[in-house]
Structure formats: C-alpha cells, structure tokens
Image (cartoon, rainbow, N blue to C red):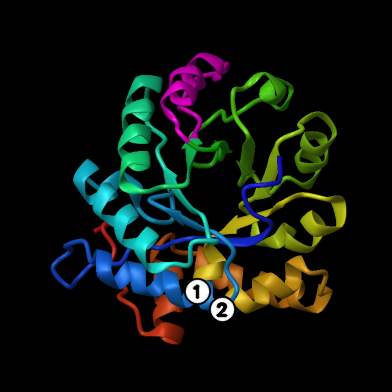
Amino acid sequence: MPPLFTGVGVALVTLFSDDGALDAPATAEFAAQLADRGVRAVLVAGTTGEAVTLTAAERSELIGAVRAAVPAEVPVIAGTGAPTGQMAADLTVRACDAGADAVLVLSPPGVADPRPYYDPVAKAATGPLLAYHFPGASSPGIPVDLLPELPVSGLKDSSGDAGRLLHELEIFDGDLYTGAATLLTTCRTVGAAGALVALANVVPELCSAAFSGDGAAQVRLAAVERAASADFPAGYKRAAAERFGTSTVTRVGG
C-alpha cells in the first residue's frame, strides 16, 4: 500500500474568535491556504490544535469544515487520542463520520504497553490509523520494539530523537512521519514518508524545501522553530498571524 501521504503535512492550529468560540470556517480557510502553498496533509485537533479544549461536537464541526475546504487529494487526519482505548475509539467513530480520511491517536499516559489501548481504536477506524509517540505530552510513549505489534498503518514520532527514528525505520514497515521540524532533511534522506509539523502553519514552503533536501532551509527553520516553540501553542499562532493575519486567541493557558 502507498503511504497515506508523502512530504510535509501541517499540525493545524485551531482558530478561535475573540470570545474564545471555535471559528471552524476561518480554520478551514486557513487550511486551504496552506494546501495551496504545498502542504500535503492536514492534521486537525492534534496537540497543536488544542484538542484537549475541544468538545466532541466542535471536533466534528472542525473536521467537516476542513475536509470541505481542502482539495480531495490532501488527506484530513483527525487527532482522536484519549485516556482510554474506548474513549479513543468513540472519538475515532465520530471523526470518521465527520469526514476524516485517517486518525492519529496519541498513546495514553502512564501505560508502558499500549497494545491493548490501540486494539479497540483499530476496530473503530474506517481509514488508516496512525499511532502517535510524543512522550513530552503523554509519557512514556510507545516503546520502539512494540511498534510492529500495533494494529496501525503508521506512526508520528514527535520525540525529536534521530536515533529512535533510525531504529523505527529498521523494524517498522508502516508509514513513518516526524513531528520534529528539525528532522525534515534527515527524514527525506533516510526514507521516512514525511512529516506532520506545527511549523508548517508558519512557513510551509520552507518546511517543504527542507524535506526536499535543502540544508540551508533546514538551518533557517531551526531558528523559526526556536522562536515559535518557546510558548506553545501561542507562539505558533502569533507567528502564523504575523504572516497570514489569523487569530492569536488560544484556549490552552487561557
């Protein structure tokens, strides 16, 4: 099977109005702008999208709006991670019903063996299921040695660990995506499918250039990343607003 997508996808920010209400139309319009600038996939309601602050109904509204706005060849991936496998499965059903082409499921906190967690999610998914390793947000993450035993078609790894990335490529046959903008050039060189990065909200063209092997672009990205990531997710929203005029309102930390 071909990968879900290749190249750089965006971990999309969720836009809110001044009173903190979800602005799904503005978020969808922004996603379409990024797709026009070369983004190859859109992750909705992920960590960068402040998913923990969204209701189930807001998630569905957001997924539907983005799916209607971006070209059909650009997959819309919904974040559906939750504290338990059944909760994640329920969110997965809702996401697929709302139009998501695939789901990305963060491993649960405090669970050393995530295999039982992913089993009900796999049964609920009607499209590709990507596991999500991000110990910074949900420790301990996914042990590399267990990857081949998970019922998933791919993995997003936001650890930023280049050594782990190489280990994953060695033992895992699924689609492999990095969540670390600092590893874009490395990913292309070693044969990973692509990336899902927050920085594509700000400089999608530069991200694509880095993934294509432009070392100078990768160095420039590192400076942008340092500035934007210092205050998450507000830093990415401010940087996106400076370029695209989008809202800077956040719920996380608000």
Identify which residue is drawn at 44% across, 67% down. 70
Q: Is residue 201 above or below residue 198?
A: below
Position of the N terminus by quadrant:
top right
Identify which residue is drawn at 83% across, 73% down. 215
Give whichever of 61, 185 is nearer the camera: 61
Give whichever of 71, 229 is nearer the camera: 71
Is residue 155 rendered to the left or right of residue 86? right
Q: Which residue is mark 1?
A: 34
Is residue 69 rendered to the left or right of residue 71? left
Magenta-drawn segment: 106-126
Residue 219 quadrant: bottom right
Tell me the crowding category of disc 2: few under 14, some 14 to 19, or many 20 or more residues within 10 angstroms, Cα based. some
**Residue type, mark 1 in image:** Leu
Identify which residue is drawn at 59% across, 63% down. 40
Q: Which residue is mark 2?
A: 37
Identify which residue is drawn at 38% across, 59% down. 67
Is residue 16 rendered to the left or right of residue 182? left
Q: Secondary structure at mark 2?
A: loop
Give the tally of numbered discs: 2
